[in-house]
Image (spheres, rainbow, N blue to C red):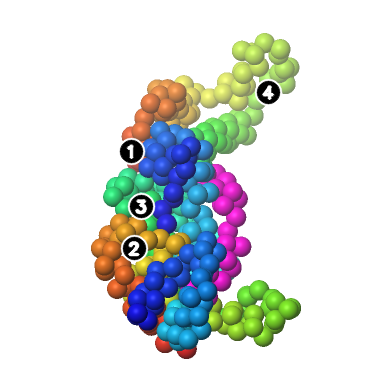
Amino acid sequence: MIQETCTRLSERISEVARGQETWTVDEEKHLAGCADCRAEWELAHTARLLAQRADALVEPRVLAEAVTRRLRDATPARRIGRRLRWVGVAVAAAAAMLLVVQTVSAPNTDPIPTVSSDPAEALHLPGLDSLSVDELEIVLASIDQPIEAFSTFDSSEWNALDDHELERLLREWEG
Amino acid sequence: MTAHPGPDQASDAALVEAYRAGSQAAASELVTRHARAVGRFLYSAGASQSDVEDLAQEAFFRAFRRLDSWRGDASFRSWLFSIARNLLKDEFRKRRGRQVLSLEDRDLPNRDDPAGEVEALEAAERMRVGLKDLPRLQREVFLLRVQEGSSYDEIAVALDTTPGAARVHYHHAVKRLKELLA
């Protein structure tokens, strides 16, 4: 009989400790006289105390926001976009440096050009005028290679690729 | 233990499918649903207070990045626990010799009964130490049973064991913890 009561209490300890049920008068009497059940009850109570302290450490909505933000930032398309931006910056910087070097080594005696309102004319780079055909080829080769590689791929097609395909594409670009 | 979705609530499996189809809101709902349970699991198994949130965030992040490895045969929550458990193991390994389970960052004692409160906090910390040293199944059965209110049937499914074995693990855990806290 006592053993049966111990088993019954043990089955209900979690619910009572979590405040979902309460002890009956008989169960309370049994608890008062049974050291084993009392020790188990104290364990459950202590475990609940741990749970309450843990609950105060995690704010579900804040955590959800942080996790979804990380997931968004970690999608392959985003990573590719970020890396492409850096490749673009590097290519532009290299081209600009080359132009500066060429301009300095072959000073232009032409009058300073005025800024045109025509976009096509505004893109005219006087530094290139002093380069030979071979030097221009080198500049073009250094600029065209990566740009060609990227421009032949329509970025809108990324949406049609799954994560594995995007990862593979990224690996190919990175060599 | 597992999420108990109400009639108007999507199941974990449905939310996982929605996330796979591109729904960030589904991911958010899954995190919100299981955040506290993962936090309790980490803290009770020995994570320091200051690490719980970061570890929980990392556990969810890894879970979503490896969703393909969740087959749906175990509950989503127990699968999260397994990721959290591995993270915690790595954390302990990194901090070997520096893992401190002390009262250094405990809450202030209750002013109505400071002695009783300190005693309870000390017992809680001893329990954390004890739980950390229990065999994995004993620890997880005990936590699922006592903190999450899981039935032995639910625990059996979650931990890939039988209800009878879960009951035995629970009683072994209780016996060892009683000795520790006596």
What percent of the width, then of the height, locates residue A148? 42, 25
Q: Residues within 10 Å of mark 1 (few under 14, many from 20)?
A: few
Rounded to the nearest angstrom, the CA distance separating label 2 from label 3 is 14 Å
Q: Nearer the viewer, residue A149 or B10?
A: B10
Q: Residue A164 got which mark?
A: 1
Q: Nearer the viewer, mark 3 or mark 1?
A: 3
Q: Are marks 2 and 1 in contact (CB under 8 Å)?
A: no
Magenta includes A68? yes
Q: Secondary structure at mark 4?
A: loop
Same chain shared by disc 2 and disc 1:
no
Q: Earlier in the sequence, mark 1 or mark 4?
A: 4
Query: Residue B5, relative to residue A26: is it above or below?
Result: above
Residue A109 circle label:
4
Query: Residue A125 or B129: which is nearer the viewer?
Result: B129
For the residues beneath circles 1 and 4, the answer to whether they share a chain is yes
Q: Nearer the viewer, mark 4 or mark 2?
A: 2
- Between the residue at mark 1 and the residue at mark 4, the CA separation in whole angstroms equals 55 Å
The image quarter containing residue A100 is: top right
Q: Amino acid at mark 2?
A: Tyr
Q: Are marks 4 and 2 in contact (CB under 8 Å)?
A: no
- Image point (71%, 13%), residue name: A116
Query: Nearer the observer, disc 1 or disc 4?
Result: 1
Instruction: Write down the region rendered in magenta.
Output: A44-70
State which chain disc 3 sits on: B
* Quadrant of the drawing holding the N terminus of chain A: bottom left
Asked whether the residues under marks 3 and 4 belong to the same chain, the reply is no
Q: Chain of mark 4?
A: A
Q: Give me the C-alpha separation between circle 3 and circle 1.
A: 26 Å
The answer to whether tags 3 and 1 share a subunit is no
Q: Which amino acid type is shown beneath numbered disc 3?
A: Ser
In the image, residue B64 sits, relative to residue A19, either above or below, namely above
